[in-house]
Amino acid sequence: MNLLFHHVCKDLRHSRWLIVLTWLTAACILWLPASLVEKRVEVMQWLPYISCGAWVLVFLTAGRIVQLDAPRRDTAFLRSRPFSSSDWLASKLSSCLILILPMALLQVAMVLVTGLRPEFIDLLLIFFEEMLAFCVVMTLALAIATRSKTYSNFIGTTMVIFFAAYIIFVMYMIAEKQLARTTKSEWSYDNEYLKLSRLLITQVIAVLGLAGGLFLCMRARRPERLAAVISSTVMIAALAWFFWPLNFVKTFTRPEATAPRSEWPDLSKLKLSFREQESWSQKKAGSVPARFSFSDGVYNDTTYRRISGHTQLDGLPEEWFAFPNSFEYELSLTNGKTFSGRYTASAGLWELMALPLVGMALPWDKSTNPLCDVELAEFPLPKAADAMTGAKLRGNVHVPFKRPVILGRLPLRAAASTKIGNRHISITEVERNDMEIRYKLAIEQLRVLTRGDWYSESHRRIEFLAVNVAKREFLRQGSAESSGRSFGHYSLQFLDFSQTIHRDLTKEHDGGIIPEDWLNGAELLIVGDEFGGTLSQSFDFSEVTLSNP
Amino acid sequence: METIIEARNLGKRYRQKDAVHALSLSLPAGRACAFLGRNGAGKTTTIKMLAGLIRPDSGSCSLFGQDSQHLRPEDWQKTGYVSENQELYDWMTGEQLIAFTSKLYPSWDKPFEKELLEKLGIPLRRRVSFCSRGEKVKLALLLAMAFRPRLLILDEPFAGLDPLVRSEFLDTVLEITHQNDWSIFFSTHDVDDVEKLADDVVIIDEGRLQVSESLDSLQNRFRRIDLQGPHEPLMKTAAILGLERHADHSRFIHSAFNSETLATLEANHSEAHIDVSTISLKEIFIALAKNFQTENPRS
């Protein structure tokens, strides 16, 4: 152990200036929390470059440390000294770990200094995520440097490898573009979790490869064999990054924002039926009964048509809402063409649905039918030659039930702030004039990849609603501008609302002069939703006409 | 007697060329062996294979009975290695480098280190990168000797040194090795040094072993012979090297000289005066080298 320490000290002394430079570069990332919240977005523009520089420096420094006594260099001082290969590898890994350890700690420090008050487990996850990423860079440098005879050889090999990798990447992108199907891919927020699964499995492979390399190295006493193991590991990890099929992350995510089971609507008492509805027809200049409505969208130069079916939902308790729905379908045209697909909805509730929770009425009548229509299918618009009538449509719809919850209430004034989950929300500005109220929010968020917080997650969507309960009025319409940036484990978003007053349904219209005292007692509601089960129902329609009547 | 170095059918190819071909040699304990050859003969390649620094393409070699490709730290604790192109940590001072290296050897002899420092006159406070070549070689020698190795491998350690430094260096090595009964395997171009230091001589050419015997035996079998006066032209044999004839004077080096050789010469050339003289190792080496060159002219 003493000998190992002796070598680590020697390595660190050898590359001390480069190490200090690397750490200083990483320390620049602390500019971010050091600056005021309003300035952070500007500072963050530079951080990716600094971060990139730090990574390059880690690579170069690790390469230099390893190159000092590279086993491939027969003139190296240590080659003819009593020092085993396994000790050599252990000392180099230790030196490189000492190099990257402060870099990961700096990321943790950055999160701490931002004032986001992360939980201990978050800090631990951030630390390990950073360490894993730096380990991949470090081991790549280790693999290349171990097999290089000189440092310039190491740089040259690196450039060739990266150039080759870039060429392969470009070729892959071109091939993917050429070979990709033009049909719209099935989208699901599960895909985001698949990305996360790939990210995680890549890192697991990297660590396993490193452990395997160490094992082989210690058995064979040839540290350069590690290079082959690591190269293979990187190849496998890259393949996993692109092609790993199994989504295992969602299984581990907490079922947050789920209402207690006992409060879920009783599905056996719910009745969802498809029905005809009066629809306006341009041709006939009159209303006709219709089963469906259609809307079009363009994706990859292909027009897609979405079919919604008119429905009647009975038995849903007052506090619950049914929106939006997922579906899978199969559409058969009369000429034999068949389309099929699946869609998983991810949107959250509309913030106005929270009004009853503060004793205000909804600005629409929900009681008669809480679900007027559901989405059934989306398909590429058939060509003119294809029959647009007589199609068969069947499949399943999945209607999730959600209820609004108020996650936080803030007085609508500057400097008010609260923490919702991992989001720190503060009101930075509130202005009133006769026509509108303008308020600006800063949302700082901790991003921990393994927790999935970075990715869209329907159940944790939050919305904002400014209300004055005493006056039974709320703000709406107007504009909402969003800007922000993310870097590392920190994300900052600014929301700038300019809104007018929407008065209660009992009032006749929106807008109007905003009284000077409106802000007295005004609150900002932070609204989320809770999941309460899914109603699945099959459908089977024949003689479908694929356009509006 | 224990064999310290053993090489069997050692071979190494660089692209299309045989750098070393089927080389076998051994070094018994307590002997000093000079490894000679022309430039590019394969000396450094052989030494690196012996020390396990490069992998042979064929054959095997061992140090202290341990395969050179799998030398253990304990084998290196018994082996000092100095090469002309060996790197030292040149960002360290001499003092730091000695302190660093001493921790690698449990047998590091501090008083002996001081003795060597006095003998060699190494600047301790100067960074290695600012030291002259001679100072670096002396430092490398100290680092290879202060732990009292049983085997010292020196790959052209005298190359590029001025005569004074070389003399100091050689004297130190000589004195210490004779005192301690170490085994030494060293390559050099300077054949004069060999006579002082070596017990055995190994000569290679084009990667092939040409001579491997004790220095005494080698010097005993090589003689310069001068034939003066009328005599028949000499029949060229493998043993006759560097034959020159000017009128009634023939001169050559006989590589297998013994009492029978002289008797035969006297019988065949009774009218000529035969003068037999001993020659230096340098002359032997030059004669052999010229002979190799004639037999295997390089492209």
Image: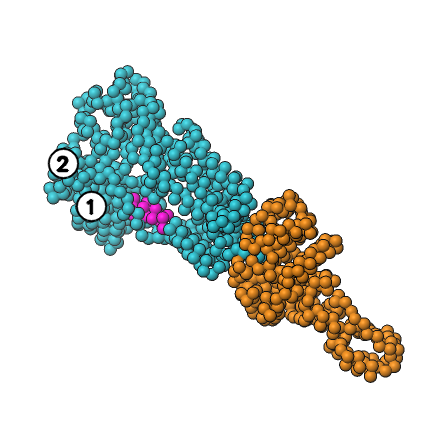
Extreme-top residue of the structure: A516
Tell me what residue is drawn at x 22 percent, y 33 percent.
Answer: A405
> Is the same chain shared between marks 1 and 2?
yes
**The magenta segment:** A186-202
Q: Give me the chain letter of mark 1.
A: A
Q: Closer to the camera, B247 or B138? A: B138
Q: Position of residue B296 (x, y in %)?
A: 70, 71
Residue A341 vs residue A425, the one in the foreground:
A425
Q: Residue A155 at what x, y percent from top left? A: 54, 49
Chain under numbered label 2: A
Q: What shade does chain B have?
A: orange
The answer to whether residue A74 is left or right of residue B285 is: left
Mark drawn on residue A317:
2
Quadrant assignment, res A486: top left
Horizontal side, residue A401 vs residue A180: left or right: left
SS label for mark 2: loop
Counting from the top left corner in percent of width and height, residue A324 is at: 23, 40
From this viewpoint, is residue A162 visible? no
Q: Which residue is mark 1?
A: A397
Q: Residue at x 66, y 71 (%)?
A: B212
- Specify the colour of chain A: cyan
The kind of residue on which mark 2 rests is Pro
Amino acid at dot 1? Val
Would you call the spot at circle 2 few (<14 residues within 10 Å), some (14-19), or many (20 or more)?
A: some
Mark seen at residue B157 = none
